[in-house]
Image (cartoon, helix red, strand yellow):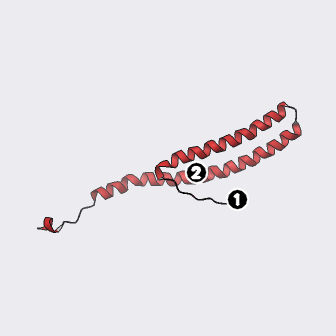
Amino acid sequence: MRANITYSVDVKNIPEEIKRIIRSEEEVLMHKLQDVVMCIHSKAYTDAREKILEARECLGNTDIRLYELDSILSGYIEVVNEAPSEELEEETEPEEPTENEGG
């Protein structure tokens, strides 16, 4: 069973957060694959099959995480692409004259 966990990250930190999550997934998956290799090297073939199943489950979890990260990155790209135009609009909005300037 999976559950969604929500937390906020400053927009400027999103790329670093994505890299952190990918590194974490990489570490877990590499460990699972190394377990398979070690079992085969030790001629523990039955154990290797179990480790292969664990690695496949890990791959499924990694696939889900990559799907989520793709969605996050898509939203990030939209925010980044909109930011310059929003900043430009804020800069070009005419200010209302104050009582002294209106004449």
Q: Where is residue 46 drawn, in percent x and y?
A: 88, 40
Magenta-colored stretch includes residue 4: yes
Q: Where is residue 31 drawn, in percent x and y?
A: 73, 39
| Image quadrant in which you'd find residue 32 | top right
> Could you tell me the amino acid type at mark 1?
Arg
* Residue denoted by label 1: 2
Which label sits on residue 70? 2
Q: Residue at the left extreme?
A: 103
Q: Where is residue 27 drawn, in percent x and y?
A: 67, 40
Q: Is residue 86 above or below residue 51?
A: below
The span from disc 2 to disc 1 (Cα, nearest Å) is 18 Å
> Could you tell me the amino acid type at mark 2?
Asp
| Image quadrant in which you'd find residue 37 | top right
Which stretch is magenta? Answer: 1-7
Mark nearer the N terminus (2 vs 1): 1
Residue count near mark 2 (Cα–Cα under 10 Å), binned few <14, some 14–19, many ≥20: few
Q: Is residue 5 above or below residue 55?
A: below
